[in-house]
Amino acid sequence: MAVSKDQKNLFNEKVRGYRNFSEDVKKEAATLKAVARKNPRLDSYVQVRTAILSLQRSNTLVLMSRLSQEIQSIKNDSYLNEARKEIGARLGELCKLVGEDLDSGLTENSEKLEGISELSYPQRVRLVRGFRQAIENVRQAMGETSKWRWYFPDLQLKLVTLARNLMDYKKYERTRDPNDPDFEPLRDLMDFILEASQNAAQEYRSKYELSTKEVSDLAVIRKIFEMQKRIYTFTGQRDEVARVTTSLDSISEKIESIMAEKSGKKKKSP
């Protein structure tokens, strides 16, 4: 159905404020990056502030698409793609700031954490929760049939990596007094890491089974389970160590079986 002139006019009127806000946020982020280039000591602050701005812009772009849907019955894919790119870019930058590995030792990024020491643990928890909500907002707005459906497991993995490397595991171990102001947010962040990693593993399982059939997706699941085992061992949760070890053995056997089958087929081919 064609969009009427009245619908277009109404949409342009309603979306104007959101569009202006989106552009203002974009300009502020660009200004902050220019400041960081001149003064590298501010880079960590700028990265975090820019990430918050990106979350605001991403959520605003989703709202703009919803307005288009409600007024013009058109889902605006360009807004949603901008939101998707915004989230992915900022997650990537933050992972570079605190560490991009899932399989390194839990305390190997201590030096990187020193650069964000002023970012409190409640703020870290709010940051990763904000990203989780922004990812879900874009995913729901795009829908399950979107061509970008299987891009979201990658975003989930980046989020897990960020959360995992925002944690100071030595501080977590030292902070045992419930009256310590960091006690609860440290536990909240740890819960987030484990919950988000489980969701990411499930997303990659769906991606493998419903789309790619690529061993590389199973390898990501294995890496996630290895990280979980490392954390559960660190926190002394023996039952969870046993559970995740079973899952890890199962996915490893599946990968080995697929690789052996592929190797056998290659040997048989002329």
Image (cartoon, rainbow, N blue to C red):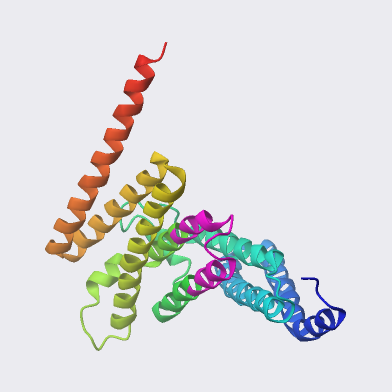
Q: Work out whether residue 261 can be spotted.
A: yes
Depth check: give the residue in front, 70 or 236.
70
**Horizontal relation, residue 1 to residue 257: left or right:** right
Q: Residue furthest bottom?
A: 179
Q: Is residue 251 magenta?
A: no
Q: Give the residue displayed 21% in from the left and 62% down from the top.
A: 232
Does 108 appear above or below 31?
A: above
- In the image, residue 176 lies at what x, y percent? 20, 78
Q: Give the residue displayed 40% in from the left and 66% down from the top.
A: 163
Q: Work out whether residue 103 can be spotted.
A: no
Q: Give the residue displayed 25% in from the left and 77% down from the top.
A: 175
In which quadrant will I find the C terminus? top left
Depth check: give the residue in front, 196 or 207.
207
Give the main secondary structure of the magenta stretch. helix
Does 162 appear above or below 248?
A: below
In which quadrant will I find the N terminus? bottom right
Q: Is residue 147 magenta?
A: yes
Q: Give the residue displayed 42% in from the left and 64% down from the top.
A: 113
Q: Residue furthest top?
A: 270
- In the image, residue 203 lies at what x, y percent? 40, 58
- Give the extent of the magenta segment: 133-156
Q: Residue furthest front?
A: 1
Does 92 appear above or below 9?
A: above
- In the image, residue 95 lies at what x, y percent? 49, 59
**Horizontal relation, residue 55 to residue 123: left or right:** right
Number of callouts? 0
**Horizontal relation, residue 269 to residue 173: left or right:** right
Quarter residue 41 falls in: bottom right
